[in-house]
Image (cartoon, coloured by chain):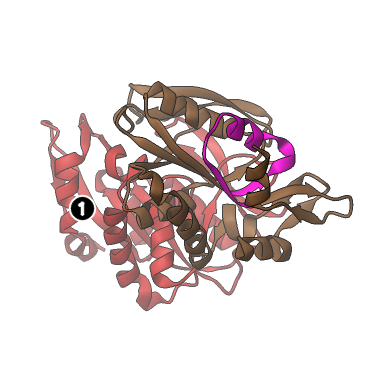
Chain colours: A brown, B red
Amino acid sequence: MKLLEEKLLKDGDIKGTDVIKVDSFLNHRVEPDFIEAIAAEFANYFSKKSPTIVLTLESSGIPIAYKTAELLGLPMVFAKKSESLNLDKETYTTEVYSYTRQNSYKVKVSKNYINSSDRVLIIDDFLARGSASRALINICKEAEAEIAGLGFVIEKFYQGGGEILRLNDYDVYSLAIIEKIDPVSRLVFISQEEVNSMY
Amino acid sequence: MKLLEEKLLKDGDIKGTDVIKVDSFLNHRVEPDFIEAIAAEFANYFSKKSPTIVLTLESSGIPIAYKTAELLGLPMVFAKKSESLNLDKETYTTEVYSYTRQNSYKVKVSKNYINSSDRVLIIDDFLARGSASRALINICKEAEAEIAGLGFVIEKFYQGGGEILRLNDYDVYSLAIIEKIDPVSRLVFISQEEVNSMY
């Protein structure tokens, strides 16, 4: 997605050869016009799969998942990371390791909100090693729901999470795929078509 | 807001005389049509204050704050609760005690995203004792930004957070104000007009 690649080149704050900070427009401060353009891409791509619900993980994915759900006319569920006294006792629960935060945490979805008749569209801001995505997939499996597909705003291709998902035949659509960050901290993109041709 | 009071009576899951669970339509699973109706109320009410930014706290307030920001044509910032390696070093930071989770945590906003020229509209799902709101107000004070107002979907009037805010002359707009939950777990509402007439 050209708009997104341009935004990343202009406003992405690159740290070394691994980290790209997108706080200014994606996961701390958001601009609704930009979020809408991203969500429209997801809605357009995944509408053919007739999803019944959009699922994300709190917090950074929520604006994009919300807007995608709105455009598709679907409800949106965000999986919860933390222990809340107010969450239902009956939950689908799985564990995920965060490399960014360097700890493990539980991810939960109330059993009331996903069931075996659902086709779940998973949306998140980043795909890196894929641990958060696998947690959401595990939740869908527990619910015996179908996975309609997985949409990511930014995929860090060099971290391998996308490969695992594609080798498992999931329909993965990433709007900007970073092949690598070169030694002078420059982003090198690879197209969705090139990636698809590998699998 | 009649639509919201009806929704609370229909789908709110009341626990004793204190807790009302709204997981099914507000803070775990959301319905975009309903969120839009809520956000339109906030946008309509607060547009006279010409806010420059919408601020909320991750995660439950994000869909509503996002949609309100979209309708007002503003950026939205969500304060972060957790330590992330990727957050800017320069942050406004404050502490908040969560009665629901029974612990204290830090709340942070990057200094890049709020400044002294901002008029901040604070949006959240719940107003109870007001600790989260006071944390967001503290962040605005640190930034020397003006508070345009505070909008809440549900105010638990009996927990007193709203009183503190109104006595401090903040413009507080709550879409459903629960005066009390009576012994048979029935919601008793009080109107915004009645509340305003008290202060």
- The reply to whether residue B150 is in sight is yes
Q: How many marks?
A: 1
**Does residue A6 lie above or below A116 as drawn?**
below
Residue pictured at 59% horizontal, 39% vertical = B82
**Does residue B2 lie above or below A145 as drawn?**
below
Which contiguous range is marked in magenta? A153-176
Instruction: Name the foreground residue: A95 vs B5.
Output: A95
Quadrant of the rendered image containing residue A86 = top left
Residue pictured at 37% horizontal, 57% vertical = A71
Q: Quadrant of the N terminus of chain A?
A: bottom right
Instruction: Name the foreground residue: A126 vs B107.
Output: A126
Q: Position of residue A158 (x, y in %)?
A: 75, 40
Residue pictured at 31% horizontal, 29% vertical = A115
Instruction: Name the foreground residue: B182 vs A8.
Output: A8
Residue pictured at 28% horizontal, 65% vertical = B41
Q: Position of residue A170 (x, y in %)?
A: 52, 35
Quadrant of the rendered image containing residue A143 = top left
Q: Dot 1 lies on which element? A: helix
- Residue bearing mark 1: B4
Q: Is residue A145 left or right of residue B186?
A: right
Neighbor class of circle 1 (other Cα within 10 Å; few <14, some 14-19, many 20+) is: some
Q: Position of residue B184 (x, y in %)?
A: 10, 31
The answer to if A38 sits in the magenta stretch is: no
Identity, as a three-letter code, of the amino acid under mark 1 = Leu
Q: Position of residue A163 (x, y in %)?
A: 65, 34
Quadrant of the rendered image containing residue B101 = top left
